[in-house]
Image (cartoon, rainbow, N blue to C red):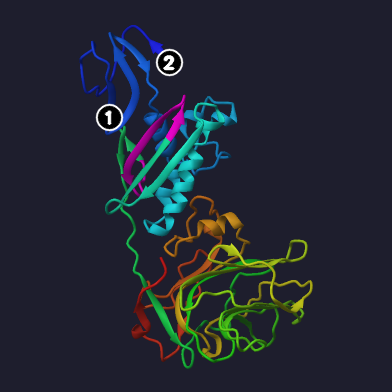
Amino acid sequence: MSTEQTGDVLLINNPGDNANAAEATSLGGVEFGIEILNGTVSMTQSFETAIWLSLFGGNQLDDGSLENDETWWGNLLETQPEFKMVSRTQNLLRSLPLVTGNLRLIEEAVIADLQWFITTGIASSIDNVKVSIPAVNRVQIDGSIVAFGEETSFSFTENWKSGLKTAGGLVAFEPVETVINKSLQLDGATEAISSPFNDDIGLDNRWSMMFWINPAIHDALTEQIIQLETQGSTNSEMTVSVGPDFFNPGDQRGVRVHLWDINNISFKDLIWLDRLPDLAWSQLIVTFDGDAVGDPLLVYIDRVDIGAPDQVNADIPGTMEDVAARRIDISNNNTYSGLMHQVAFWNVVLTPAEIAALGSARAILTEDFGAYVSGADCLHWYKFAEDETSIGRDYGNGELVTLSVHPNIDQTNIVEGGPT
């Protein structure tokens, strides 16, 4: 494939003026993929420019979605969907924290952004995509494209979490957010965190909860991570528990979710056995959709739906409501033993795509990024080690509910280490 243009050509920042020799022009380490021979400009079979624009060419409003009308500028006059481009890679680099756990997500975004080479018949394969962190706040993306029987390799080193705030064609970069990697340690005997009984938590018949936990292993019975407790009744109460269970005291790694409806009836009491890893950090997410057929209650561990429960004590239709006088109890009855990093509540049901996007404990839950679009619906978000002087502070977007700590809890409960 060759495209030629003759006549007067203006090249900005052309590094050489020798019109009698073929040369590839470049700017900032990005090859333009053109040759100039005797005044004639022609395309080479090098795709560095097209690749770079696919990965990093989005504007400020490009959220990596083809449904977004205000996406990459090259789409403005394009009517064929297979020729439209979005910069998923750029979007993730602007929104995900710089941690090794996110490298796979970036690799997947790179491959997705370059698929148009294959769907349009330009290339036959995209190979050897690898994403690495070569230096502080930097990301390196390597790979190759096979087209016309030849392999073109590419390698770009860019700033991670770039803002792409363009002014006069220049790119300014935002610094990566600094995160304190500490956690709250609870003893399972005398320590708990709770709110008063007079709070409107804002959760009704559709909700999601997230916990970053590293529970200890011991011989106690059910360890309640959380209970939403209603004053004077069990109307719309809920508890999430881990560890040994009343029904299965030998199971150290189970998960139990227990819900009551508006009539104080226990309508969901489900147990998953032997699911949590031993003495390791886990992201536990529970979603409930009381408005959907079958009012599904789903449990995810490390972003994977763990499927049907192993034991069903109750599973009948029921409706929950937002009770005005409800209390958040973390480590209810002082039962949770181990480390806890975050707890969050949404008044929506997180989708599997959103849950997959929440792969890092450093994700900013109150802001949208990538497939995650429920930032505004994150009503309560507790980051226990973020501010040692206010362990129960609420960082959510709802009516804030500050939790009170047990007198036995103080700054000495904040310990080094946490999930990434």
Decide which of 273, 415 is in the foreground and name it. 273
Does the magenta segment cover residue 159?
yes
Q: Residues within 10 Å of mark 2 (few under 14, many from 20)?
A: few
Q: Which residue is drawn at 42% across and 75% down?
A: 384
- Rendered location of residue 203, percent (x, y): 63, 70
Q: Which residue is drawn at 65% across and 89% down?
A: 246
Q: Quadrant of the N terminus?
A: top left
Question: Disc 2 marks which residue?
Answer: 2
Under mark 1, the amino acid is Leu
Occupied quadrant, residue 172: top left
Question: Disc 1 marks which residue?
Answer: 27
Q: Which residue is drawn at 34% across and 39% down?
A: 155
Does the magenta segment cover residue 411?
no
- Rendered location of residue 123, percent (x, y): 49, 29
- Rendered location of residue 174, percent (x, y): 32, 49
Q: What element carries label 2?
A: loop
Under mark 2, the amino acid is Ser
Q: Nearer the viewer, mark 1 or mark 2?
A: 2
Cα separation between marks 1 and 2: 22 Å
- Rendered location of residue 213, percent (x, y): 48, 75
Q: What element carries label 1?
A: strand
**In this image, 246 relative to 190: left or right?**
right
Q: Is residue 131 visible?
A: yes
Q: How crowded is mark 1: few (under 14 residues within 10 Å), some or many (20 or more)?
A: few
Decide which of 19, 124 is in the foreground and name it. 124
For the record, the magenta segment spans 145-164
